[in-house]
Image (cartoon, rainbow, N blue to C red):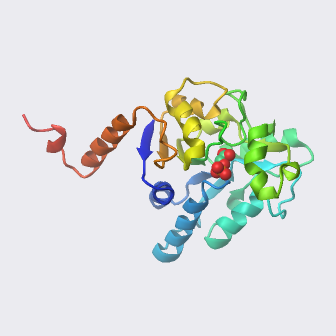
Amino acid sequence: MRVIIETTADDVSRRGANFMAALVRRKPACVLGLATGGTPLGVYAELIRLHREDGLDFSQVTTFNLDEYVGLAATHQQSYRCFMQSNLFDHVNLAPAKTHVPDGRALDFHTHCRQYEQRIQDAGGIDLQLLGIGSDGHIAFNEPGSSLGSRTRLKTLASETVRDNARFFGGEDQVPRLAITMGVGTILESRQCLLLAMGKGKAAAVRSTIEGPVTAQVTASALQLHRDVIIVVDEDAGGWLSRRDYYAEVEHAQSLLESGQFRALGIGNQ
Ligand code: PGA
């Protein structure tokens, strides 16, 4: 896992957006896995800026969102479809038919979840999956105890998640109790994962994810099994990491390599 510790939350957003924009430039018909919540807001704002000011072109991009609340219509203000429309889709040139968010009002959830997985396959799989992390260590709505091989399905929200998300609904009693979510197994099939975290409230979950054991009690820790993961955190979210110095050394070596300063790395000195 590549661990990048940035100074501020804005730096995390910019770094995350740059990874995504680089992929879109390199592979215009790429498949992006997208996330909702407070974490990706700055990323989406930066992608919109890059679209407007630098002409970043989303016309061939396909997107799949991680999850959706059960019971909310796409037009409900707190639905994740609505979140994506107002925070990204309505402001860039994505083709509406190429944006996918699970349907929280599907009548046959089993079939809908299976079809969602099939659509990901049919699109060629997800190239880059953007992820936030819950204070309980979840990715998407894969709450503690979720199978690490799980697929898209219905999931009951944990009480921590209901509490965390109450701010968007005006009270815990308004938060839906069920969601459709990609599984941990679905996420692990993405070619690359990009997990972002900001703020002190995420510090414990970030530490468990990176330096703890792989466990279904912290579903983000399953990313340790993935071969291409980038985790970008701010100082607060990375505050509990014990190997911070090492992660910084790796990043330093990486930037020397990328800028061709091989001698500084001891390459070609003999
Ligand atoms: P947040 O949620 O981005 O609103 O902090 C992250 C998550 O629950 O996955």
Q: Residue at left 70%, top 68%?
A: 86
Residue 255: x percent and y percent? 29, 48
Residue nearest the viewer, comparing 22 with 218? 218
Number of marks = 0
Q: Is residue 95 visible?
A: no
Image quadrant occupied by the C terminus: top left
Q: Residue at left 63%, top 57%?
A: 62
Q: Is residue 206 visible?
A: yes
Query: Does 7 sit above or below residue 181?
Result: below
Residue 186: x percent and y percent? 66, 37
Residue nearest the viewer, comparing 213 with 236? 236
Q: In this view, does 139 lie to the left or right of 233?
A: right
Query: Does 85 sit above or below residue 137?
Result: below
Q: In this view, does 227 lie to the left or right of 219?
A: left
Image quadrant occupied by the N terminus: top left
Q: Residue at left 64%, top 36%?
A: 137
Residue 22: x percent and y percent? 45, 58
Which residue appears farthest toward the bottom when viewing the image?
Answer: 53
